[in-house]
Image (cartoon, grey):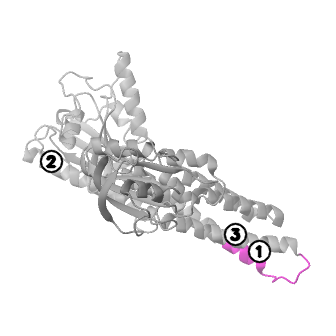
Amino acid sequence: MRRETIFALSSGAGRAGVAVIRLSGPQSGAVLNELLGRNSPPKPRHAIYAPISDPASGERLDDAVAIYFQGPASFTGEDVVELHVHGGRAVIDGVLDCLSRQPGLRLAEPGEYTRRAFENGKMDLTAAEGIADLIDAETAAQRRQAVRQMAGELGALYESWRARLMKALAHIEADIDFPDEDLPDGIVPVVRGDLAAVYDDIIAHLADNRRGERLRDGYQIVILGAPNAGKSSLLNRLARREAAIVSDIAGTTRDIIEVHLDLGGFPVTMVDTAGLRDSSDVIESEGVRRATARAQDADLRLVVVDRAYWPHIDPETAKLIDSGTVILVNKVDDGAAAASLPSQWRGQAQDGREVELPVLAISAMSGAGMESLLHHLESRVKEGLDFAGPVPLTRLRHRRALEDTSTHLARGLRSDVAELAAEDVRLAVREIGKITGRVDVEDLLDIIFGDFCIGK
């Protein structure tokens, strides 16, 4: 069936110096000829500068740079045209309106260009997801991870496991189908060894402390403490703007307030919470409940203590202290007073274990101690997210598929019946194939590519 030709604005919306409008499909070259008034498309992959006009009215729309990519040597694997036009709203609207009136053309859906690239074998699903992550990247670390995934590192790793499992499966099935043949006696131990090696690799890959997923979503730092300890002032100081209301009235903050930061090239979500205390106020109590729930999911907890109450930590806050906590003694403007504070706090974590936590003296109002705090936070975030070695897991769907893969392999390794072991290996191969798109994953495609922007 002859596929429709799609078009869309592929650059960002809004006023700009240059905008890129992309077409993909069998009519791309013919439409370009109409716009340029030519009989044949320009030489593939060569940019030309020429006026483009509405084929129906002859009205000149703009002077543009046009590039023709002949399939399959294009991003989507189809004939593709890129029009680099002036980025004014009227120019973009005029060109898009003209294209919409051409027979057989329609506006692209979100992610449709990348989906066509996947369907035409230009990339696997992990690379396609890497493109989405690269578009959404806000920090250098997110960009580096997305580039590696887009380049195919993650897909290559998974495909290598899949190939090893398929080879093992072929040997098991040969042993089943040809029992009377003179097959090597050592084939079963070798196959089991290969399966065990893949299983170990997958388990090690899963044991990454969710670094890749946390890097995509942002490292979560939750600020906790009693009312009026200075949590909102600290958030504003870190954000360098008035993100939260600051007041002497206890219980001012009643809901979760989030600020997104870039610390040392890593994405961080800083979360201000309601002051932790017992309250008869229904709304404030809900704020405390949300603060407690958010603390449970935090990568790092900052417990803010008013210097006037140090070293006492209120019971409601103490309940949430764990090994991933930093104690901040606030309202310490005097250098001598800061030097007198201990560098460590010894106490009991929420699980009952004794912990020794760092103590930093700060003043959220004056900014004293903030440089040391930022340096400490950058070190903790880098330790939690930096990842040397193979590109890590980046999505929950990858993790679930690999967990299912490991379950099938573990069961297959325990089985003494070759037929049952073969079925488990076959299921493991299928689970890995779901990640890269090497099996029927039609039900996943709408979800994956629906998250893309239009024009990509």
For the residues labelled 2 and 3, the Cα–Cα distance comes to: 58 Å
Tag 2 secondary structure: loop
Give the residue type at disc 2: Gly
Foreground: disc 1 or disc 2 = 1
Q: Is residue 322 above or below residue 131?
A: above
Q: Please tell me in which quadrant of the rendered image residue 39 appears.
A: bottom left
Image marks 2 and 3: residues in contact by CB distance under 8 Å:
no
Residue at the location (78% across, 81% down)?
186
Give the residue type at disc 3: Met
**Residue 211, visible in the rendered structure:** no
Q: Earlier in the sequence, mark 1 or mark 2?
A: 1
Q: Which residue in the structure is indicated by mark 3?
A: 166
Q: Is residue 49 magenta?
A: no
**Residue 299, visible in the rendered structure:** yes
Q: Is residue 184 magenta?
A: yes
Q: Specify start and end residues of the magenta stretch as a single range.
A: 179-195
For the residues labelled 1 and 3, the Cα–Cα distance comes to: 9 Å
Residue 313 horizontal side relative to residue 435, left or right:
left
**Residue 215 appears at what percent x and percent y?**
39, 53
Q: Which residue in the structure is indicated by mark 2?
A: 369
Residue at the location (43% across, 64% down)?
41
Q: Residues within 10 Å of mark 2 (few under 14, many from 20)?
A: some
**Residue 305 appears at what percent x and percent y?**
24, 36
Residue 369 horizontal side relative to residue 435, left or right:
left
**Residue 15 appears at what percent x and percent y?**
25, 44
Image marks 1 and 2: residues in contact by CB distance under 8 Å:
no
Q: Please tell me in which quadrant of the rendered image residue 159 appears.
A: bottom right
Residue at the location (41% across, 27% down)?
289
Q: Residues within 10 Å of mark 3 (few under 14, many from 20)?
A: some
Judge by depth and name the residue closer to the eye, 203 or 147.
147
**Residue 437 appears at what percent x and percent y?**
60, 58
Q: Which residue in the structure is indicated by mark 1?
A: 171
